């Protein structure tokens, strides 16, 4: 009897030993029945199911086949710090061996395992959102969509997305979705990107704006949404600047955006690291902002 397993590349990179076609292995697995009736074997990687109540069992088998599966990713709409599958077909590469986890660089390892004793398999467990089982992405999206439709911001953000696409579509790629999120990617070199999204994890709902890596957070009310068009106009015109100042073991980054009415929005981030005579080492995702100059070109 053969079973199919997908091993997360990220978890394998942590501490998994290597293996190869023809080798005997001992892995701990669970069997889950998903809402569509599909039954899948899942590796109990790093004790994924240890506190879920899902039964797991060690199985002995011989590796019969191995494929690497790599997806194509793109920044999420409204949140450039999150990568999501782009929708392009995954790249599938056959291999006969997998190295140990250090420096591993593939999304998934798909393994066909020939079981030495099928009776070792655990009983099938029905998928339950309350358990520590793999989550259903479509369910999360449906929940976010319902929250957006019920929010007072939904109509205003949809109208704003349509207006900005008409006004700036010839200068930037405008990506928007049905959840009030938008990304505006200017075609001009050295120009600043604009992204925003709604954060429903807090009460009241928050509006999160990201401009060239600097992040502002406001309540998702009419005043904040009304200001978005002014901010995009200022960024498109190049009326923004980022200044930096080293302060001992840290670096302070200050992003300023000058609106048409004379208002200046300022956001500051402290990047922790350690100072040096000729360099500044950064221990933070904000390091990308240190690699560029402080000025931005207009979109046109």
Image (cartoon, rainbow, N blue to C red):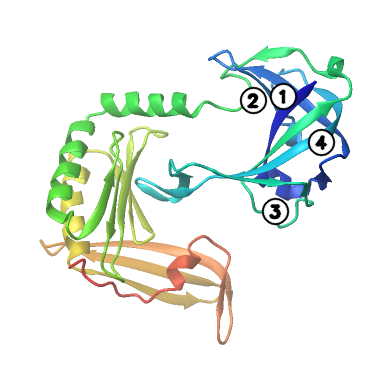
Residue 150 in which image quadrant: top left
Q: Position of residue 190 (x, y in %)?
A: 31, 71
Q: Which residue is mark 4?
A: 63
Mark sitting on residue 132: 2
The structure residue drawn at horizontal position 75% and vertical position 37%, both measured from the top left corner, is: 65
| Earlier-in-chain disc, 2 versus 3 | 3
Disc 1 element: loop
Q: Nearer the viewer, residue 83 or 85?
A: 85
Q: Position of residue 66 (x, y in %)?
A: 73, 40
Q: Which residue is mark 1?
A: 51
Looking at the image, residue 92 sits to the left or right of residue 176; the answer is: right
Give the foreground label among 3 and 1.
3
The image quadrant where one finds the N terminus is top right
Give the foreground label among 4 and 1.
4
| Earlier-in-chain disc, 4 versus 1 | 1
Query: Callout 4: 10 Å neighbours few (<14), some, many (20+)?
Result: many
The structure residue drawn at horizontal position 13% and vertical position 49%, both measured from the top left corner, is: 166
The image quadrant where one finds the C terminus is bottom left
Q: CA distance from mark 2 to mark 1?
A: 7 Å
| Earlier-in-chain disc, 3 versus 4 | 4
Q: CA distance from mark 3 to mark 1?
A: 28 Å
Q: Nearer the viewer, residue 81 or 274?
A: 81
Give the foreground label among 3 and 4.
4
Contact between labelled residues 1 and 2, with CB atoms less than 8 Å apart: yes
Q: Which residue is mark 3?
A: 104
Total numbered badges shown on the rendered structure: 4
- Residue 50, visible in the rendered structure: no
Q: CA distance from mark 4 to mark 1?
A: 28 Å
Disc 2 element: loop
Contact between labelled residues 3 and 2, with CB atoms less than 8 Å apart: no
């Amino acid at each position: 009897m053969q079973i199919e397993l997908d091993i997360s590349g990220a978890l394998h990179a942590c501490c998994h030993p290597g293996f190869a076609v023809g080798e005997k292995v001992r892995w701990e697995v669970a069997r889950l029945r998903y809402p569509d009736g599909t039954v899948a074997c899942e590796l109990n990687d790093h004790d994924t199911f240890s506190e879920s109540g899902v039964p797991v069992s060690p199985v002995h088998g011989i590796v019969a086949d191995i494929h690497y599966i790599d997806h194509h990713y793109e920044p999420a709409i409204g949140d450039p710090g999150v990568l999501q599958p782009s929708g392009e077909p995954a790249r599938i590469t056959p291999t006969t061996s997998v190295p140990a986890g250090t420096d591993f660089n593939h999304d998934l390892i798909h393994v066909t395992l020939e079981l030495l004793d099928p009776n070792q398999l655990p009983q099938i467990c029905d998928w339950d959102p309350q358990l520590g089982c793999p989550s259903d992405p479509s369910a999360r999206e449906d929940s976010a969509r319902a929250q957006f439709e019920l929010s007072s911001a939904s109509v205003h953000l949809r109208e704003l997305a349509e207006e900005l696409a008409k006004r700036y579509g010839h200068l930037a790629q405008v990506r928007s979705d049905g959840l009030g999120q938008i990304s505006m990617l200017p075609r001009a070199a050295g120009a600043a990107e604009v992204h925003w999204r709604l954060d429903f994890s807090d009460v009241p709902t928050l509006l999160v704006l990201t401009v060239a890596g600097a992040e502002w957070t406001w309540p998702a009310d009419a005043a904040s949404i009304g200001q978005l068009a002014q901010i995009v106009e200022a960024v498109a015109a190049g009326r923004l600047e980022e200044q930096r100042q080293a302060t001992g073991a840290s670096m302070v980054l200050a992003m300023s955006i000058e609106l048409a009415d004379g208002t200046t929005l300022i956001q500051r981030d402290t990047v922790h690291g350690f100072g040096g005579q000729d360099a500044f080492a950064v221990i933070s995702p904000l390091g990308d902002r240190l690699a560029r100059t402080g000025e931005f070109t207009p979109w046109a």
